[in-house]
Amino acid sequence: MFLIFGLRTKAHRLGLVPMACRVCGQSGSMLLVREVTKFSLFFVPLIPVRTKHVLYCTNPLCGAHSTISAGEARQLLAAGTGSPR
């Protein structure tokens, strides 16, 4: 009998938040993304293992990303527009 298992990460766009990039310093919109990693059994995602929130710089020359906490993500979405692309 074969047992097929693994981990799969999916990214969910939460929206654009107005703030300055921590790397390049350009003020503008940053993309807020929630990445959820789930344990899969026979290619069926079952249990969420890890969730993290990441800010991506929309500047094409920078493209930096930084991880933030869930509380910070909620505050940024409440303060910003929060509309997904």
Image (cartoon, grey):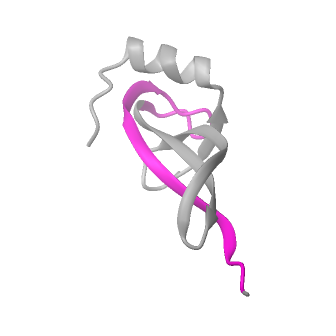
The one of 12 and 60 positioned closer to us in this rendering: 12
Residue 27 point in image, percent of width and height: 44, 28
What secondary structure do most residues of the magenta stretch adopt?
Answer: strand
Residue at (53%, 24%) from the top-left corner?
Answer: 73
Residue at (65%, 37%) from the top-left corner?
Answer: 67
Q: Is residue 16 above or below residue 11?
A: above
The one of 22 and 35 positioned closer to us in this rendering: 35
Drawn side of residue 83 relative to residue 3, left or right:
left
Q: Is residue 12 above or below residue 32?
A: below
Drawn side of residue 64 relative to residue 15, left or right:
right
Q: Which quarter of the rendering shows the C terminus?
A: top left
Q: Can see residue 58?
A: no
Residue 69 point in image, percent of width and height: 65, 26
Q: Can see residue 55?
A: yes
Magenta-drawn stretch contains 24: yes
Q: Extreme bottom residue here?
A: 1
- Which picture quadrant has residue 30? top left
The one of 23 and 3 positioned closer to us in this rendering: 3
Q: Which quarter of the rendering shows the N terminus?
A: bottom right
Magenta-drawn stretch contains 66: no
Residue 61 point in image, percent of width and height: 48, 55
Q: How many marks?
A: 0
Q: Is residue 65 above or below residue 43?
A: above
Write the start and end of the magenta stretch as one range: 2-27
Residue 21 point in image, percent of width and height: 54, 34
Residue at (50%, 18%) from the top-left corner?
Answer: 74
